[in-house]
Image (cartoon, rainbow, N blue to C red):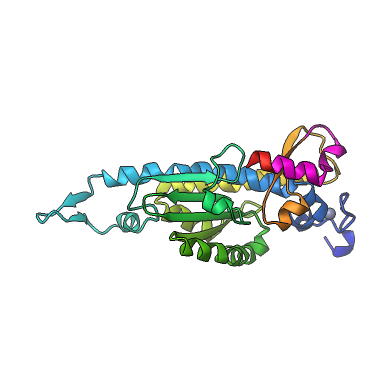
């Protein structure tokens, strides 16, 4: 289809290309359509990640560990799986707590909550003062790398701040493509969390399908300037976005425009309550 043939976007009157509808429309963004998709994928990702702790436990009791005469633990054999377990991010302690920037999940640590940046997922070990922050983006395929670099940069200062406070902190940006393309960052993240094999394959498929299905939903409603379906969108207000914070949850019952125009004061208030 040539450029001249693209219909007009019902939301912003721009060119209604697939990329525009699925990732570039500013009105769709302000209505929370992309945030809604992001949070659906995030829900699946944090669920998968919260099971990683169990993986670690099972590996430490597995028969592939043996003790030498000197009492030093050694790993039997040299398979790739075992080597990965040795370098798994969560190895070395068993008090990991997962929190996520979603209403139904545990809140982030105070040391993170006091900053302007709210990572999507935080895994934290109090005993070893380690913090792993995961930042999810659901970009169009052509922007996967760009998104990764952007998120790395965005969290660089926070990582430094946490290090000053005595934490061992790292940020891991992860991208799940809006069209269901899973990049190497997601594969790498799960591997570092010692999620392997079938479980990893299933998890990656689930993430891809969630992104793709959500995009299909966004696409199918591209000509509805308001949502006709009762659904909860998470709306990022401009003020909240500027502060680097997220998200006011607004229930959008059938075509209620008013729901979108939550006043700044209300938004701030709701945000306080959520946090
Ligand atoms: Zn548009």
263 with respect to 107 (left or right): right
Q: Is residue 11 magenta?
A: no
* x, y percent for residue 217: 73, 42
Q: Quarter-wise, where is residue 257 in the image? A: top right
Q: On screen, 104 above or below 160?
A: above
Q: Residue furthest left?
A: 69
258 with respect to 184 (left or right): right
Q: Is residue 268 magenta?
A: yes
Q: What segment carries the magenta color?
A: 252-271
Near-viewer residue (206 or 35): 35
Q: On screen, 86 above or below 268?
A: below
Q: Quarter-wise, where is residue 105 in the image? A: top right
26 with respect to 139 (left or right): right
Residue depicted at 74% across the width and 45% down the height: 268
* x, y percent for residue 267: 76, 43
Residue depicted at 26% across the width and 44% down the height: 62
């Amino acid at each position: 289809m040539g450029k001249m043939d693209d219909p007009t976007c019902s939301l912003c009157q721009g060119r209604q290309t697939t990329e525009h509808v699925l990732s570039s429309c500013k009105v769709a963004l302000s209505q929370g359509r992309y945030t809604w998709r992001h949070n659906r994928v995030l829900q699946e990702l944090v669920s998968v990640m919260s099971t990683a702790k169990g993986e670690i436990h099972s590996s430490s009791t597995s028969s592939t560990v043996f003790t030498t005469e000197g009492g030093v633990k050694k790993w039997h054999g040299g398979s790739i799986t075992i080597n990965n377990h040795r370098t798994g991010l969560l190895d070395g302690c068993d008090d990991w707590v997962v929190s996520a920037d979603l209403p139904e999940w545990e809140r982030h640590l105070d040391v993170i909550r006091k900053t302007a940046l709210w990572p999507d997922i935080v895994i934290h070990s109090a005993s070893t003062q380690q913090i792993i922050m995961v930042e999810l983006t659901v970009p169009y395929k052509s922007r996967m790398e760009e998104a990764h670099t952007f998120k790395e940069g965005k969290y660089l200062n926070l990582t430094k701040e946490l290090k000053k406070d005595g934490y061992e902190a790292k940020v891991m940006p992860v991208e799940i493509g809006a069209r269901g393309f899973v990049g190497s960052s997601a594969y790498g993240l799960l591997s570092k969390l010692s999620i392997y094999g079938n479980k990893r394959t299933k998890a990656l498929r689930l993430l891809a399908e969630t992104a793709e299905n959500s995009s299909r939903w966004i696409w199918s409603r591209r000509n509805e300037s308001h949502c006709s379906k009762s659904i909860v969108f998470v709306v990022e207000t401009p003020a909240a976005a500027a502060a680097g914070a997220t998200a006011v949850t607004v229930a959008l019952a059938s075509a209620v425009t008013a729901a979108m125009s939550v006043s700044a004061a209300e938004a701030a208030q709701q945000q306080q309550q959520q946090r």
